[in-house]
Amino acid sequence: MWFKNITLFRLTEPLSLSAEGLAARLEQCIFQPCPSYQPSSAGWISPLGRKGRDLVHAAMGRLLLCLRTEDKVLPAAVIHQMLEERLAEIEDQRQHPVRRREKLELRERIVEELLPRALCRNRYGYAYFDPMAGWLVVDGASPRGVEELTTILRKTLDTLPIAPPRTRRSVAEVMTAWLAEGRAPAEFTLGDSCELREAGEAGGIVRCRGQDLASVEIRSHLAAGKQVTRLGLCWNERIAFVLDETLVLRRLRFLDVVQESLRDIADSPEAVFDAEFALMSGELALLIPRLLEELGGEA
């Protein structure tokens, strides 16, 4: 149980639900397999998977939940081919082209015909509440995927008072200053990747990976006025990640010094899962406030 990306939301109101109360709410929107006539289905499952019973996994006061989404897979090429064949038959009969509205209606009927025979693809989205610190932490960097989870969570709970965190200093400006100085502040070190962008919508983008960020080449880009929009960082030799200008943490990696603390955990999958979640959320609870502090604190 290791998150790969982090999107943060500040709870603008305290979470009033206990683990049991939250599970009771999630039960009302539990996952149901996608019907043959429906293109997708989404609902809550146990974070532990098939062996789990509880819809909320609690550890150290933090509440983990999991959204399962099932999508019917219909290749666009197949739909297009069937549509072209049907259109050709109709035009041969009528001796004139089919109107655009009829084409759209015909396409919808073809999709309805194919849905019962379509393959299904499952996606899993994880998030946890940290009521004491006042965070909702979502495992995801894609705005679309994160919005899907938070939207369904809001409908399930009837309310979800959250907002993206805002910092007093611009994240891009701070990262640019760190790279210009060739060093990050205490507890942080620079990684080997970054993204630099010229000002303006049409500005060029330079992406570097596996490179010395103190090199002359990087400094020349900074001297030309480019700003850092993504920067690889390491915190306390425990967590490596790429910070972007929207305060999303990408390519999150918990390093060996963290993983070693799990060596003596029992072999059961449930015990390992619980230990990993407790350790991961505990490490993030220390990293997040330190990172925000270096960005000037929350606005």
Image (tube, rainbow, N blue to C red):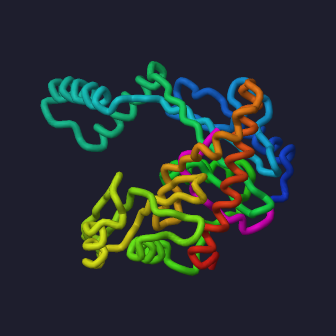
Residue at the image position 21 percent from the left and 37 percent from the top: 98
155 versus 185 height, above or below: above
> From the image, which quarter does the C terminus lie in?
bottom right
Q: Nearer the viewer, residue 92 or 215?
A: 215
Q: Position of residue 217 (x, y in %)?
A: 25, 67
Instruction: Write down the region rendered in magenta.
Output: 1-14
Residue that appears at 70% across and 33% down: 263
Q: Which residue corresponds to the image point at 86% horizontal and 43% vertical from the top-left?
A: 20
| Residue 229 left/right relative to 85 | right
Total numbered circles: 0
Left or right of residue 14, residue 124 in this image: left
Query: What's the magenta bit mostly, secondary-structure-wise?
Result: loop
Q: Is residue 220 magenta?
A: no
In the depicted structure, whether residue 268 falls above or below residue 146: above
Residue drawn 73% across the image and 24% down it: 267
Identify the image quadrant of the N terminus. top right
To which quarter of the image does residue 131 belong? bottom right
Q: Position of residue 66 (x, y in %)?
A: 67, 40
The one of 168 and 213 positioned closer to us in this rendering: 213
- Residue farthest toward the left in the current orientation of the protein: 95
Location of residue 280 in the rendering, given as x and y in whole percent from the top left corner: 67, 47
